[in-house]
């Protein structure tokens, strides 16, 4: 379980670093992105390991899924997209 936790944290950090490098204008500060990626991966590994205790690959997939989900919540809209008021206003 320790190796799965360390692997999921490294997976979350790598994913967060990649997202921060690819989308620097749409994400907040780098420490927040890295912490969110690692925390999401660790929580995803914990939940997946609790539900499916037999497969370490499934644990890492669950870690990846929750990390991606939490990182997507940090995304801001791109600056090129202009939003207008509602049609009734």
Image: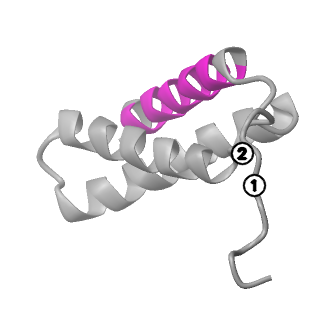
Query: Around disc 2, counting alpha carbons within 10 Å, would you say few (fewer than 14), some (14 to 19), or many (20 or more)?
Result: few
Answer left or right for 81 relative to 43: right
Quadrant in the picture for residue 79: top right
Decide whether residue 11 is among the magenta residues. Answer: yes
How would you classify the magenta stretch by its main secondary structure? Answer: helix
| Residue at x 28% of width, y 63% of height | 50
Asked if the residues shown at circle 1 and circle 2 are in contact, with their CB atoms under 8 angstroms apart, the answer is yes
Q: Farthest bottom residue?
A: 88
User: Quick one: 74 or 47, which is closer to the camera?
Assistant: 74
The N terminus lies in quadrant = top left
In the rendered view, would you say 29 is above or below 77? Answer: above
The span from disc 1 to disc 2 (Cα, nearest Å) is 10 Å
Q: Farthest left residue?
A: 54
Of the image marks 1 and 2, the number of the one nearer the N terminus: 2
Answer left or right for 64 relative to 43: left
* Residue named by callout 1: 83
In the rendered view, would you say 61 is above or below 10? Answer: below
Secondary structure type for disc 2: loop
* Residue named by callout 2: 77
**Place of residue 41 in the rendered image (x, y in percent of width and height, measured from the top left):** 49, 43
Secondary structure type for disc 1: loop
| Residue at x 22% of width, y 64% of height | 51
Q: Which residues are magenta?
A: 4-20
Answer left or right for 13 relative to 44: right
**Place of residue 14 in the rendered image (x, y in percent of width and height, measured from the top left):** 56, 20
Decide whether residue 57 is among the magenta residues. Answer: no
């Amino acid at each position: 379980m320790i190796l799965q936790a360390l692997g999921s944290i490294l997976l979350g950090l790598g994913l967060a670093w990649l997202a921060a490098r690819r989308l620097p204008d749409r994400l907040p500060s780098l420490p927040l992105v890295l912490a969110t990626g690692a925390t999401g991966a660790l929580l995803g590994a914990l939940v997946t390991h609790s539900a499916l205790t037999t497969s370490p690959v499934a644990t890492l997939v669950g870690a990846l899924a929750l990390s991606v989900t939490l990182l997507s919540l940090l995304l801001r809209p791109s600056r090129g997209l202009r939003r207008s008021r509602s049609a009734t206003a």
